[in-house]
C-alpha cells in the first residue's frame, strides 16, 4: 500500500511540472499552464523549419479584465538533453499572442533531435499597475 502511495505522489509532481508530450495526437493544442487567468498552450510541428527539426508554436491568453506581466521558462526535452528558453512580456486585458511575429515560435534543436516533451516552470503572473500601462 505504501508503494502505491509513493507512485501517486510522483505522478502528481510530474503533472504539476507542466510537461506535455507533443506527439500525442489526441488534441493538437496542448495546455501547459492555466492559472490566474493566464493560459499557455502550444502546438507541435514535426518539421518545424520545413525539413526535419521539430518546432513549437506558443499561444498566450490573458482572460483577465486587467493587463498582466508574465515570465516563465519553456523546457524542451529530448531523450538526453533539456533546453530552456526564457519567455516574458505583457498582455493587455483579454489579449492573445501567438507565433513567430510575437517571438513565440521555437525550433530548440537544430540537429534533428526529436522533442519528446515540452514543459513550463517558474511561471510568474503579475497584475500590471496603471503607472506602467503606457509601456509597449
Image: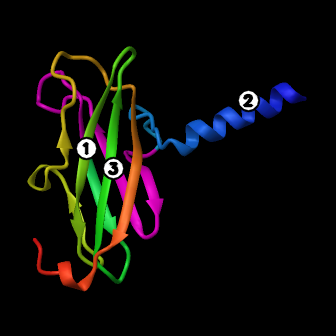
Magenta span contains residue 65: no
**Secondary structure of residue under mark 2:** helix
Sort mark 1 into few (<14), some (14-19) or many (20+) by Cα contacts within 10 Å.
Answer: few
Residue 107 appears at what percent x and percent y? 18, 32
Residue range of the region highlighted in magenta in the rendering: 27-56
* Residue lying furthest front: 131
**Secondary structure of residue under mark 3:** strand
Sort mark 3 into few (<14), some (14-19) or many (20+) by Cα contacts within 10 Å.
Answer: some
Sort mark 2 into few (<14), some (14-19) or many (20+) by Cα contacts within 10 Å.
Answer: few
Q: Nearer the viewer, mark 2 or mark 1?
A: 1
Q: Of callouts 2 and 1, which one flags the residue occurring earlier in the amino acid sequence?
A: 2
**Secondary structure of residue under mark 1:** strand
Q: Of callouts 1 and 3, which one flags the residue occurring earlier in the amino acid sequence?
A: 3
Q: Nearer the viewer, mark 3 or mark 2?
A: 3
Which mark identifies residue 86? 1
Tell me the residue that label 2 is attached to.
Answer: 7
Asked if disc 1 and disc 3 are in contact, CB closer than 8 Å, the reply is: yes
Residue at 36% over, 68% down: 126
123, 109: nearer the viewer: 123
Tell me how far mark 3 sits from mark 2, CA to CA: 28 Å
Residue at 76% over, 30% down: 6
* Displayed quadrant of residue 109: top left
Residue 21 appears at what percent x and percent y? 44, 34
Q: Is residue 5 left or right of residue 127?
A: right
Residue 134 appears at what percent x and percent y? 11, 80
Tell me the residue that label 3 is attached to.
Answer: 72
Tell me how far mark 2 sits from mark 1, CA to CA: 31 Å
24, 64: nearer the viewer: 64
Amino acid at each position: 500500500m505504501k508503494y502505491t502511495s509513493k507512485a501517486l505522489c510522483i505522478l502528481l509532481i510530474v503533472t504539476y511540472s507542466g510537461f506535455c508530450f507533443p506527439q500525442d495526437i489526441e488534441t493538437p493544442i496542448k495546455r501547459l499552464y492555466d492559472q490566474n487567468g493566464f493560459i499557455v498552450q502550444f502546438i507541435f510541428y514535426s518539421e518545424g523549419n520545413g525539413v526535419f527539426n521539430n518546432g513549437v508554436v506558443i499561444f498566450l491568453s490573458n482572460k483577465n479584465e486587467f493587463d498582466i506581466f508574465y515570465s516563465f521558462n519553456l523546457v524542451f526535452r529530448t531523450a538526453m538533453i533539456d533546453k530552456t528558453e526564457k519567455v516574458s512580456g505583457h498582455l493587455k486585458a483579454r489579449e492573445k499572442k501567438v507565433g513567430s511575429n510575437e517571438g513565440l515560435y521555437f525550433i530548440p534543436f537544430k540537429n534533428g533531435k526529436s522533442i519528446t516533451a515540452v514543459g513550463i516552470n517558474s511561471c510568474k503572473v503579475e497584475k500590471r499597475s496603471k503607472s506602467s500601462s503606457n509601456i509597449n
